[in-house]
Amino acid sequence: MPTIRELKKRLKSTETTGQLAGAMRTVATAKYSKVSAAHTAYSPYAAALSELGRGALPEREKQTGVPVYVLLSGNRGLCGGFHHELFAFLSETLKGESEYALVPCGRMAAEYCREKGLPVLREFVSSDVPSFDEAKELAGYLAGIYASGEAVSIDIVYQRFYNMLRQVPEKTRFLPKADESKSEGELLFFPDRETVESELAPLSLAAECCSVLLSSASGAQAATVMAMRSAYDNAEASSRKLNVEINRLRQAAVTSSVIETASDTGND
């Protein structure tokens, strides 16, 4: 049976853990609010721009290359099963592939690829609240390896954000699109189609990439909030139980002392 001193040490450790979890929950909640608002506001624009630029995609020099998978993750752990589910989904996706390459985006994704010895073309690290400039850099690189023929196809593997409690691992095709044919006569371009498409293609890909990055980041922050909330609540419950146990031991010690004192008085 543990002593009061041992229980006090355990209580102090539990309270410290609860304080850390509470602080991390507060930080994650603030980041989640920021990235979720950005994702909600940006998604309609990204969808419209992606549709507008569907026919303005990079031309391929050759049709060789390997399938490339872009793995999006968070930059930290402590988010429950968020990354475990993501990496398990990636492993299942790669089972049927004999040759492939990866582009990890996020510190956890990069560490996973290095740990497993997976073939990596280049690593990217985006911020906890991804910016359009970060998405533009990633999209530009992906468009480059697709146009050069280094990648025969590019898929993005990430945790799609639905709400605070639901993030689902998903694979979405980035390049090539289902229909890359250029439509004639549907839109009026000024000054001309070629000039507009030369600017529209990278912007369209960057917008789509930014939307996916924001979705992944929203899911990572939501998972962190829920994990830290659970850790904080568990620490609070454990602290209450330990306090009860400590008080019972103190009461038992006092009762035992009173009984011993009363027994000694009776013997005198």
Image: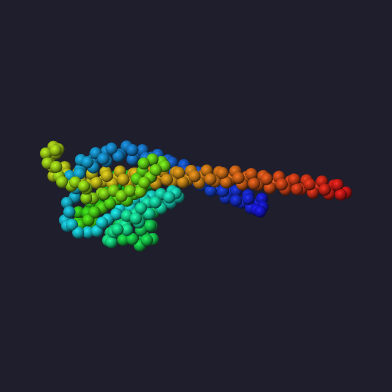
Q: Say which residue appears at 32% left-offset and 37% top-offset.
A: 41
Query: Can you tell which quarter of the image residue 103 is in?
Result: bottom left
> Is 94 rendered above or below residue 24?
below
In-front residue for pair 208/189: 208
Residue 126 shows in the view: no
Q: Is residue 60 above or below residue 210?
A: below
What residue is rendered at 60% in x and 48% in y?
11
Query: Which of the 4 image quarters holds residue 42?
Result: top left
Could you tell me residue 174's position as x and y percent?
A: 25, 49
Q: Is residue 43 rendered to the left or right of residue 167?
A: left
* Residue furthest out toward the front: 96
Q: Is residue 94 above or below residue 233?
A: below
Where residue 158 appears, x then y in whole percent?
A: 34, 49
Colouring chosen for the image of the structure: rainbow
Name the residue nearer the viewer: 202 or 109. Answer: 109
Count of numbered circles in the view: 0
Quick check: can you spot residue 206? yes
Q: Looking at the rendering, which quadrant does residue 165 occupy? A: top left
Q: Position of residue 47 (x, y in %)?
A: 26, 40
Q: Residue at x 28, y 61 (%)?
A: 98
Residue 43 image point, x, y percent: 30, 39
Q: Which residue: 20% across, 44% down?
A: 54
Please give left or right for residue 146 compared with residue 248 in the image: left
Q: Residue furthest right?
A: 268
